[in-house]
Image: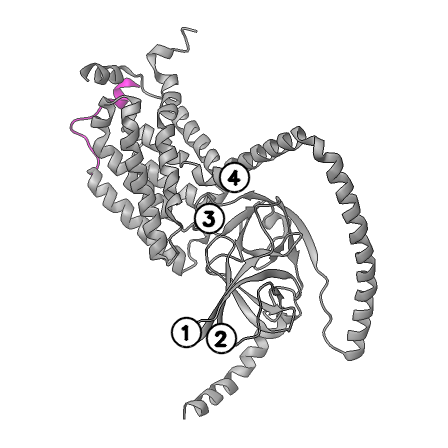
Amino acid sequence: MFVNHSEQEILRPAKGWFIIFSLMVALLLNLLSLQGIVLTLRPDFVALVLLYWSINQPQQIGMSAAFGMGLLMDVGNSSMLGQHALAYSVMIFLALLMYQRLRIFGLLEQAPQIGLILLAAQFITLLTELLNRTHFPGWYFFLASITGMLLWPLISFLLKMPHDPKHDPNVL
Amino acid sequence: MVMETTPQFFKRGPSSLTRLVFFVLLSLILMAVDTHFKYLHEIRQTIAVVIYPVQKLAFVTTTIYDLVTEFSVSRNLADENARLKQQHLFDSGQLQQLLALRAENEHLRKLLKTTLRNKNKAIMAEIVSVPRDPFNRKIMLDKGIQSGIQTGQVVVDDLGVVGQITRTYPWLSEVTLVTDKNHSVPVQVVRNGLRSIASGTGKYRTLELRYMANNIDIQNGDLLVTSGIDGVYPSGLPVALVSKIKRNNAAHAFAHITCTPIAGVDRNKQVLILSLQLPSSENPTKSIDIQPNDKRRGEIGVR
């Protein structure tokens, strides 16, 4: 347990441009025009990347960044301005409450907790929509959180690579 | 670099709970203002310009993906080509008739001294994105203010009405589909000319006709076309087919009529944006003139 923790501490701080780049790629993935089952199963990539950075670099990505990304998503998705911003801010608040504990776990053990945080964010989106008198879309709506949870180990592995001492690009 | 990211013990910003409360309040205010007033237009435009490169890149990616998949299934290409040629022949035959009919119609209308029906100009656009959550019945098209698109224009595909332009950005425009819960189209039943309003429900491929009497003459499979009396939709465009009628006799005063839209945004990527020069542009001044009369009539009615 302690070993894992100290290993995480050794990580070199991520470059600012890499964080911005990863967020933009996530936004791109979210804005891809998909159809059918893929659309239903698509996780919220922006939420996943925001969660990764807020857990691993809480000094750089916090609630303000989440709010800003939420506004970008709102316009890109043509939903109510502030809807994603609200969901992302609350989500990052939950992540910041738990980040010290989350870092102790390995990527696979983190996944269920990330799934819960994603569910909470989706629940907030659903609540705002229901208050706006939209019908309940059906339980399949929450499948996106489950795929997000399953993708978490992969996404955090990819985001960790550039600033992991074990994968030093200079060594190559 | 390392010094910057180490936690600072003494100099700290507001606590995370304070930040949360601030951001939650801010987003709630934004949502309330955005749904009930139209003050946030400029903010939306600015953000739209910022994310346009990402949207464009996403669009290019899907286009390339489509091209590749199309290329890999090129075995069907010959079949498709033959089918399209046949379709083209059929269409051009009908088009010739249409031209003759249009000329005749114009001539007859001139004789009758009624307003001429307007010729529609159409701009082809491609669907850039469909929303990623099930609440939103909106799509984005790749033509915007720069191509002369205005809000209120009608969007159709090869089969029928898709929706209406509700927001325009410099290079993109947002279409509210007919199934959106805030959208209604005035329609007419082709079989008997019955007029009604088809309202969106927000559910996937579902429209409904509200406030129709239980004994109304409507059948399953009836075709609904735009009636054109709103001055937004040109008349005669197919909208939906009646799919389910529930006449609850005692419990409700109105029949529950569900329809399925004919056009589908999940089938093809191209749509047409119709631009109309409406003859009803003089209507607002007319209605202002009429207002005092209306008021008097209202007062009489109250008495």
Distance from disc 3 to disc 1, alpha carbons, whole Å, reads 36 Å
Question: How far across and how far down the image is residue A20, in percent?
Answer: 41, 29
SS at mark 1? loop
Disc 2: host chain: B
Q: Which residue is mark 2?
A: B214
SS at mark 2? loop
Q: Residue at x 25, y 38 (%)?
A: A93
Distance from disc 4 to disc 3, alpha carbons, whole Å, reads 16 Å
Q: Are marks 1 and 2 in contact (CB under 8 Å)?
A: yes
Q: Give the amino acid type for the residue marked by disc 3 in the picture.
A: Ser
Marks 1, 4: nearer the viewer? 1
Q: Residue at x 43, y 49 (%)?
A: A79
Q: From where the camera sits, is residue B274 visible? A: yes
Q: Quadrant of residue A104?
A: top left
Q: Which residue is mark 4?
A: A34
Q: Which residue is mark 3?
A: A78
Q: Give the amino acid type for the residue marked by disc 4 in the picture.
A: Leu
Numbered range of the magenta stretch = B1-14
